[in-house]
Image (cartoon, rainbow, N blue to C red):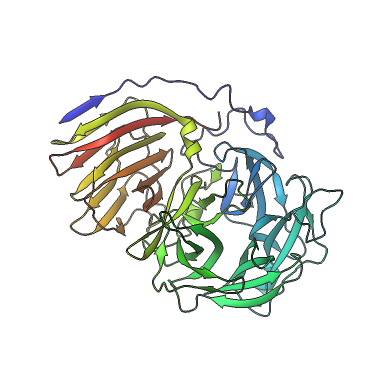
Amino acid sequence: MARLWLLLIAVCLFACKEKSNSEIAVEKEYPASPYSEKFRPQFHFSPQEKWMNDPNGLVYHDGVYHLFYQYYPDDIVWGPMHWGHAVSQDMIRWEHKPIALYPDEHGLIFSGSAVVDEKNTSGFGENGKIPLVAIFTYHLMEGEKAGRKDFQTQGIAYSLDNGKTWTKYEGNPVIGNDGIKDFRDPKVFWHEDSEKWIMLLVAGDHVKFYVSDNLKEWQHKSDFGKDKGAHGGVWECPDLFKLPVQGFDEEQWVMLVSMNPGAPNKGSGTQYFVGEFDGISFTTSQEDAKWIDYGMDNYAGVTYNNVPTGDRIFIGWMSNWNYARNTPTEVWRSSMTLPRKISLHKKEGEYFIKNIPLEQFSSLQNTMGEFSSVPLKSPFTLETELSLNNTDISFTAKLSEPLEVVYSNENGEKVSFLIRPEEGMLLLDRTQSGIIDFEESFGKEVQKQPFVPEEREVEIRLIMDASSLEVFVDEGKYVFTNQLFPKDVYTQLEIDWESDNAVQNFTYHTITSIWK
């Protein structure tokens, strides 16, 4: 067995870069050393404490990327929803802010989006200040408990100080409800061609399109999806944006729609459609569902409005409604995926998207090893005295023969990524990864993803945090995102390839915590 022993040197590259905890604007006092709990993500966003789910209001304005999110400040299980808030200048390091939106007489504050109203179409701007406008779903618990179907409506709020404080519109709700039980998650954007605001709303099993001149008054124009895509559960968190097709002189519109349950590996997942949008309706020739991620823990993901580079940046909630309330954490619950850049591609007339971590994530990398070629006539093993639960490991290989990558620890816990070209399947096995008994579906079955074996070198990248593993194959054409809860950290990585060839361009990085 070929073994490589590396001496890891503890470095503190972040000490002069990060704000101290005393400089973080929050509503209450926190321990001097937060983010040290067992399973606490070190480079994925998570709240300081309590429950979090869907990302909301993703928008860039005046040098700041805003991340709002579904938040319950009183417990680590779902409860009355607020909008939590954090900001970043690089999408990697986050600063916590006070809660942005609280429930009111119209209901709880469910998911939604935010826009920069540069033309002041809403009239909310004052003294030359450009308003940020949040669009969200009100959920009236009293109406739901009474058995009504009109308990979800849409409201707006605005900020004139780049998200620090918010004022709710006195005319809320701006869209009422005629009796649709699941009527939520507005995604709004400015459509240049029609010079209108466009809103997507999910209504049970499909998407509804609305248009507006001023963000206050909306007209329903069209529906999409009753006869398209997957329908194993309720549709949620829609998004729509236009992307250039890489390598071609064309553009297409991409729609994201999350669904729970009914994802390929059970529970929650996010499908996408590629097609055309004319300012009124979305059309596609795509019949079957395509999925942005085949892991079990990437849900409710949406993209940023107003990104200055024009890139389409995506963040998802790293959990699954099958077990989100039961994961073995005590201070906080849930984190977000790494921010990812989405790109659109085409091969043999078939459109598909890729999603890959942002380039600036490399600013957290500490290079521990680089090898141009690693022979695999016998399994290659990387062992450390420290943790592999803060690493970014990548290599290139031809996907024409079986390959297996296994992380393990001395307790026999392990998680495996496998390539099975004879089956046309990629596999992710967390059935022995650690704590799995908090919900039956978490570690019961091996996750599967169909793929097309090809005789070419592709990158395989594995990013592991304290309680998650994100796998990106072929620059994000194939993705698995999953939570993991090992009782002890993983300290060994083994690559076994049924080939006389070698993997190429092997790199091994540890990742600096964004919280210390």
- Residue 446 placement (x, y as % from top left): 29, 55
426, 428: nearer the viewer: 426
- Residue 399 placement (x, y as % from top left): 23, 49
Q: Residue 382, located in which quarter of the rendered image?
A: top left
Where does the N terminus fall, quadrant-wise? Answer: top left
Where does the C terminus fall, quadrant-wise? Answer: top right
296, 332: nearer the viewer: 296
Relative to 498, is 354 on the left or the right?
right
Residue displayed at 65% across by 48% down:
84
Residue displayed at 69% across by 60% down:
135
Counting every numbered tag in the picture gives 0
43, 278: nearer the viewer: 278
Can residue 482 be seen in this snapshot? yes
- Residue 402 placement (x, y as % from top left): 19, 49
Q: Is residue 262 above or below residue 8?
A: below
Can residue 152 be seen in this snapshot? no
